[in-house]
């Protein structure tokens, strides 16, 4: 326990410091965001007033149908963009790790999307969105069930259910989100975790734990009632995944050869083009991740979120370039790539409620934070091959508290409490889960398999047989 | 003829068995799909009633223009997604084959998109959609012509032509579909076919044969009149391509070194990341392929199709993972990737008319089927480097008959008849075409060129000169 | 000066010849484009009539809100597609160059997107769109400023500002465009330019020069007043970038080993799959680049532009395949890929105003032109590793003058004047800028670094350490 108390403490200190710094520049943060959130709430209220139509056909002939259609279409396209993020994760993770483990990483990432969607269909969706507080659920815990519904023809596809999209659109958008949480862990535990063990760990994490913590905010649970704000998931998705990853890495231990005789040895990724493809696809996908979280195609809301998301990503990358250039003497591509992701994770909690200039600042701080955090975790021997804990965990926390700093409407204290509640749950659940899997079936491949590579060991395959065969 | 009678017979038996199996689980298949098809038909009927506007400007000021605009936009975006599938095919095919043939495969795939679009513009589009049965055409065969039209300003771009999109949208969406059929063949004949011969074969197949069989259903031809149903092309595109590929492979023969002394020798693909990129892009593109086939942005229809498509893909992959894990003792990435495609091809015929749970089952069966089918074709010496015959041919047939099994509104017998009619035509046409090309200009590269690689032989180039040069 | 006068002269002659040729086939070019432009102008006029709403909420309840929402959504999606073009540039440029410079190219391309967006936010956007001529600006030069605005709530997000999209949508779409101009240069100067020097050069080019020339047409400046037409930027973006690249290459000089003892030595790219991925992503992105330039989701306009764009790309590639097949005796993949881009660049100026058949012809000529141009520049010792000067510069000029040839509504002479004005400015500005950077901090890496590779020299990294390490 002593080992992991260090990073947590250090992380808290670092965050405190940066929060102080951010508070010191309120004049830059004062530019107002448009009342995007207010509009969304107005739309939500409209739900109750919306008439239930006699049939879907009657709805299609109603006045609001064209607007409903474009709103719904945007959420579907956003879902497709979030789907593409899984290819982004697969390529960035395989690019930043060794070629002898590439098949394994690709397999894991493919399996997680599929398992995540199925788990979400059979349990997660209804566990995360259990209905209205007070009537249907208690705000803390709900049981899941198969997402399919009976009375779909009227209630579920007209504006009586939702002002902006159908039940199926709702499911598919949320299902694409769900799997990302487990995918974040995948990168941190790469190059030494047993395939079967990881798949069972992921299945449980994404099916049962992610919807649980998600329901606290997006399912109108107790954190939502408190006023906690997390627009598209800096905490609910990214910090959740990042801290679940931290716990899994602590149970798993570092890769062989990473720490030799008290020294840190770099283990290089095998393909920077793959890493670049991954990050750019993730950036693209984020337009769906954040843009779709407006939950309609509202022109002001979506376009504003596109702008804040873009500025944070660009600022994050430029900052990470400069900071790593200063610290390492040379501009580092993997840091620049992680800077993009840091900015994106950072802006995710408040993309609709912070000012344009604040979004830049959030990106700048995230871009610096991710470089220091990666060095920090490396130093305290938390071996995270792709920097997932720093990118998603640390910058996810940063983005969430930044809402308390840069948006006038949200309490800093509530943001900290909400973030801590979810991050702590993710950490503990992942720790228990990984430990249980370790005890039952083992978590780590043998030392021989790790040295030979998981592609041969777990899959009996190679990613690049033409080239590696030629080497022998 | 004896050689190829085996796979066909075996295939029919396999399908019969699985159909029996599927019929045995009607209780799972009973969950009803929404009346998506009914709405589409209602919309189609509305065409006749729709007023023709005096001018396009008058149309833009009419009440229904906003809805028309969003419908039209979705079909255009769907066309762009289907375009991206060509990059998916190019990467998955080059990833699953040897690095010495990569330039050749990329060239073929690029050429097919371009040739396919041009052939469709000059002949295919009008041959496939020749107008109304009885008045303009006979339901069996129509001549093609240049797709451009004269009286475009009023008739072709207002709702008088179509309730949901313009003439140009119609063309571009269908043109992107057309080229996929020929691309499917490309993977099966890879690593030994002559470039020039293949391009001529493809040009004829995509320009003349695909629109012919396509017109029978989507051009309101005789199969449509019979009640045959194929939502987005399990038969019209995928089984067409798959069985054309089977015929071409039978004419072409297996690769050198695949069958040595009566034994099957594996020839490994050269880049699993490329294969993964390809399959994920295909999955993404399928949201346009199936989602666009709703032919409007109807919220219920498109979102429902997104859900069934996603569940079938996920179920197909997980099933292929498990089946190959059991059979091969190790989880196989290329089987998992083919499982995704199998599920997608399988759901394509009925994505809008089968229940949600049925879509899962269709994916599960497709995912198992593709693994057995790949082993089967390998055993009977039909050498298909990427599994295209199994993925597109076998699972395309499965998806089409599955509509007869899982959707209450369509006859199993009609589905079998329609599927057989198109598949047999594709097979025979491809067989004749490939044999004719073989007789006239040769179909296969020399043995020396095949061993050296087609990149050097056909293109005088290498895909990775930095790495292969270093090997020498 | 003698050196670069040759290519310019040759280029002008070549263009003249081809223009004569194009004029000789007026019968093919007579098919009329729909009055897309007229509609756009009508919409633009509507701006003045559009009522300013009391509040955004009032706007959302107005009659035209659904149409505004779909128009706005399309421009946002188009912006995301243009963003993806940066991944296309990164992959095609790294694929067509040597593996020892891959990290450097990826870093440059990532940095340019980020820097370009930030520069455009702080200066470029307002410098390029300074308001109404006569009142706010003189039509020749405007100062830039931070793009954020104060009175955003009403004026900037309702149809009082624009009939089709919000202020933020406008910014993000234009910002994605801006960075492409500098990215074009990146490919031409690859494999020998100093990283820091290039970043400073790019920052100034994209922030100050691109908005200046852009304002002359799209900012309603003097070229716009003259009747110059450039729909989506054959000149404003592509020829600008291509001729800026030419100047930079002339200052920089060819790569070591390209011209040895008076002979041209080929320096091969290292990954054709990367090049293919890049070109296909660029093609996809072009649907946003051209399709979004309709500046609304107008069904007729956008679908028409999709068709002309697609036909030009396909025709360009097929022509480049055939021409290179004849000239080189073997079909060349990199020429086929450049043929796609040539067709796309060529159609960009007139995608909405030329006939469908004309779009085919424009693509055919661009596809031939790019092959000859690449050979020409290679011969006159202008070393452009990826063919950017030919693709973007030469074909950009071709596309712009083609509007004068194929669209009845635009003057050939005005097109030539407008194109020359911008191309000359880009060339001179880039020449001065590159020379200044060269004088102050040096433009070129040392000979040793160039031979060893810029990845080690500039970044201390390698793109493929697993494979290159094995080679040693």
Image: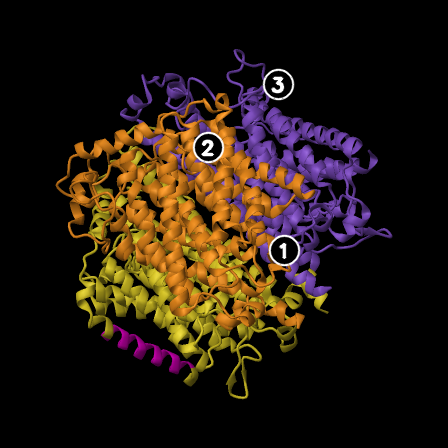
Chain colours: A orange, B yellow, C purple
Secondary element at tag 1: loop
* Numbered label tally: 3
- Is there CB contact under 8 Å for labels 2 and 3? no
Query: Considering only vertical position in the picture, is A185 above or below C196?
Result: below
Q: Is residue A339 left or right of residue B14?
A: right
The quarter of the rendered structure image containing the C terminus of chain C is: bottom right
Q: Do badges 2 and 3 share one subunit?
A: no
Query: Where does residue A202 sit, x and y in percent of width and height?
Result: 38, 58
Q: Residue at x 61, y 49 (%)?
A: C92
For the record, the magenta segment spans B4-20
Q: Label 2 lies in what chain?
A: A
Q: Residue at x 28, y 62 (%)?
A: B360
In-front residue for pair A342/C227: A342
Q: CA distance from mark 3 to mark 1?
A: 51 Å
Name the magenta segment's main secondary structure.
helix
Foreground: disc 1 or disc 2:
1
- Within-10-Å neighbours for mark 2: few <14, some 14–19, many 20+: many
Residue bearing mark 3: C141
Residue bearing mark 2: A308
Q: Quadrant of residue A164?
A: top left
In-front residue for pair A270/C444: A270
Secondary element at tag 3: loop
In-front residue for pair B430/B322: B322
Q: CA distance from mark 1 to mark 2?
A: 35 Å
Residue bearing mark 1: A266
Q: Residue at x 32, y 64 (%)?
A: B363
């Amino acid at each position: 326990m002593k080992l992991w108390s260090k990073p947590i403490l250090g992380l808290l200190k670092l965050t405190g410091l940066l929060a102080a710094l951010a508070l010191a520049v309120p004049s830059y943060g004062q530019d107002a965001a448009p009342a995007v959130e207010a509009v969304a709430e107005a739309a939500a209220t409209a739900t109750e007033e919306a008439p239930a139509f006699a049939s879907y056909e009657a709805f299609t002939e109603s006045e609001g149908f064209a607007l409903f259609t474009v709103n719904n279409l945007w959420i579907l396209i956003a879902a497709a963009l979030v789907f593409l993020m899984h290819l982004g994760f697969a390529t960035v993770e395989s690019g930043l790790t060794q070629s002898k483990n590439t098949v394994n990483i690709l397999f894991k990432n493919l399996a997680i999307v599929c398992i995540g969607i199925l788990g979400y269909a059979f349990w997660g969706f209804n566990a995360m969105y259990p209905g209205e507080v007070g009537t249907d659920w208690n705000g803390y815990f709900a049981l899941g069930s198969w997402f399919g519904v009976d009375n779909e023809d009227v209630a579920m596809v007209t504006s009586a259910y939702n002002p902006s999209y159908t039940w199926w659109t709702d499911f598919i958008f949320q299902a694409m989100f769900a799997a990302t949480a487990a995918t974040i862990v995948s990168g941190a535990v790469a190059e030494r975790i047993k395939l079967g063990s990881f798949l069972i760990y992921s299945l449980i994490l994404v099916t049962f734990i992610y919807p649980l913590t998600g329901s606290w905010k997006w399912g109108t649970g107790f954190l939502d009632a408190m006023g906690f704000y997390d627009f598209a998931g800096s905490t609910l998705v990214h910090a959740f995944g990042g801290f679940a990853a931290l716990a899994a890495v602590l149970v798993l231990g570092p890769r062989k050869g990473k720490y030799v005789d008290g020294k840190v040895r770099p283990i290089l990724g095998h393909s920077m083009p793959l890493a670049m493809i991954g990050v750019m696809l993730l950036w693209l996908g984020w337009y769906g991740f954040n843009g779709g979280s407006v939950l309609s195609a509202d022109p002001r809301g979506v376009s504003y979120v596109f702008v804040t998301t873009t500025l944070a990503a660009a600022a994050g990358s430029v900052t990470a370039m400069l900071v790593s250039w200063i610290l390492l003497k040379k501009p580092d591509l993997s840091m620049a790539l992680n800077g993009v992701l840091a900015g994106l994770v950072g802006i995710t909690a408040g993309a609709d409620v912070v000012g344009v200039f604040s979004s830049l600042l959030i990106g700048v701080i995230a871009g610096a934070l991710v470089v220091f955090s990666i060095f920090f975790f490396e130093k305290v021997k938390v071996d995270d091959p792709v920097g997932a804990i720093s990118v998603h965990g640390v910058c996810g926390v940063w983005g969430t508290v930044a809402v308390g700093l840069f948006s006038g409407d949200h309490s800093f204290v509530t943001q900290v409490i909400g973030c801590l509640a979810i991050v702590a749950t993710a950490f503990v659940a992942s720790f228990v889960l990984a430990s249980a899997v370790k005890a039952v079936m083992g978590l780590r491949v043998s030392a021989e398999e790790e040295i030979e590579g998981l592609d041969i060991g777990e899959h009996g395959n190679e990613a690049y047989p033409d080239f590696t065969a030629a080497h022998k």
